[in-house]
Amino acid sequence: MLSQAAMRGRSAALVACLSARGASGLSAAAPSPSLLASIRDPTLLDGGGFPPRAGGGVPSFRVEDPGAPSSGPDAAVADVRRMGRGDAGEAIGRASAALPGWRDGTTAHARSSVLSRWSRLIEENRDDVAAIMTLESGKPLAESLGEVAYGRSFLDYYAAEAVRPSSAGGGFLSPSPFVGDDGASPRGRIMAVHEAVGVCALITPWNFPIAMITRKVGPALAAGCTTVVKPSELTPLTAIALRTLAARAGVPEGVFELVTADGTTTPEVGEEMCTSPHVRKVSFTGSTRVGKELMRQCSGTVKRLSLELGGNAAFIVFEDADVDQAVDAAMASKFRNAGQTCVCADRFLVHKDVEQEFVSKLEKKMSQLVVGHGLESDTTMGPLISDLPVKAISDKVRDALSEGATCLSGGEPMPSVGPNYFQPTLLANVSPDSSIWRTETFGPVVAVSSFETEEEAVELANDTASGLASYFCTRDMSRAFRVSSRLENGIVGVNEGIISNAAAPFGGVKESGMGREGSSMGLSEYLETKYIFLNT
């Protein structure tokens, strides 16, 4: 990491350079000195032909560093153009116009090559992309670098999938059940052909600013679809950098459109995406409440939908578990991105025979977490995304304590560090009726309750409307298969806390959504199958 003096020197030089370049220098965002001081290539924020830059009378909104010691002007990272319904409609129009050329005018091998080049450019610029991500999302730089690699893995995976028979242009032949005029020989051929769905609207969250985009855009482009992406208003800069690199990799204009909306214009942009007859598929990652509304809006045009919605994951530690392994898995699952992931463990169910050992060892591990700004080299846990979840988590912890829970560590905000920080918190004896147990926490709080039988553990784990992920630890192979089959979740981790990868199908059941991302199943979400009968 650069010294403060070096950062100031680089910042001043970059500001002077950018001022000399004029309005065309940065077309997507007007970055702050702190952002300019943290990256080597400010042209990443050009956006690759993005509409006119923020500033100069163009409506804009401010992106802030959630890890800053205070809110206000000092927390500013960049000003980004605020786009609305009209801009979304224009982006959809460009994607629709580009669809025939991308879908029909390129080979699968050509699309594969573009995805591979895009991945390589992200790798070449990984330090800048990671720094941008840390400044706008707050996650530690090591996690941001890890996400850059994770995000690239989807482009690499779908570059390979693009040329397989399961992709667009592929399909299968089946024997005909019909007989010819002679009453014996087969008549005709049954052919099924995979084709691109069409224009896809992709709405992504702030907690994984690169991976949630590449996990959707990668398979869409591999299939021959064109895309319109609406990133979170909290983390649009990573998306802008991705679009710049996509353009440099050869993604044509209109194939990867970007709509940067703030909190006020996001609803109208979402509605335009859901109601436009030109959009044939919507993919959304976010809250269950918003997912239900988008589902309703899409019904008018009967769009294809992929929804990855909220979770409230259970983490079960059975009496035969390797407790040290369970603690490591719990730390990995719970404290990545300060607990702000849809698959992080929220409800810890620990067998009474190992509860004391598990809690004691977990508390020791938690004490080793270093909370601070994501750009500091020793930071292992960053801030929450804003002060709103800090208040919400504080209220949940207070309610849990009033209902009989015991706070073994943490439990308080950290205003001396900044307005968005919350202590890593360990609660024992948590009531299954408390709000911190019944609802997704999205923060660094471990809520522990004990159980005595496998039946009880599974029943408690399934007692939720969510069904995204769950975890459990055991040494019993029979139990591993038995419990996995009984848990009502789309994703189950056994003796492991981090299970997401490009080769695995990611998605939930119940109110956690529909469809899958990752694996060959993720590609099929962007394909239609056309049946053709050939009587030749």
Image (cartoon, grey):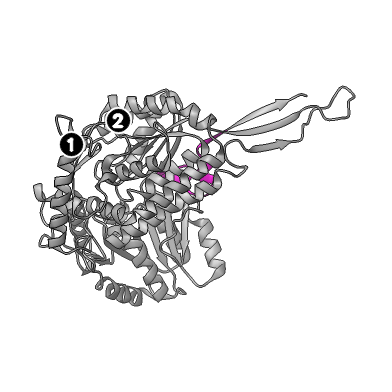
Camera-side residue of 189 and 470:
189
Q: Position of residue 55 (x, y in %)?
A: 16, 34
Residue 415 is left or right of residue 164, and the answer is: left
Q: Disc 2 vs disc 1: which is toward the camera?
A: 1
Residue 67 is left or right of residue 169, and the answer is: left
Cα–Cα span, label 2 and label 1: 30 Å
Instruction: Note whether residue 351 is visible.
Output: no
Q: Residue at x 57, y 67 (%)?
A: 478
Q: Position of residue 500 (x, y in %)?
A: 44, 56
Q: Amino acid at mark 1?
A: Gly
Q: Which residue range is magenta in the image? A: 508-528
Instruction: Note whether residue 475 is visible.
Output: yes
Q: Residue at x 15, y 47 (%)?
A: 15
Q: Position of residue 263 (x, y in %)?
A: 22, 37
Residue 22's label in the rendered image is 1
Q: Position of residue 421 (x, y in %)?
A: 18, 58
Residue 269's label in the rendered image is 2
Q: Residues within 10 Å of mark 2 (few under 14, many from 20)?
A: many
Q: Amino acid at mark 2?
A: Val
Residue 129 is left or right of residue 165, and the answer is: left
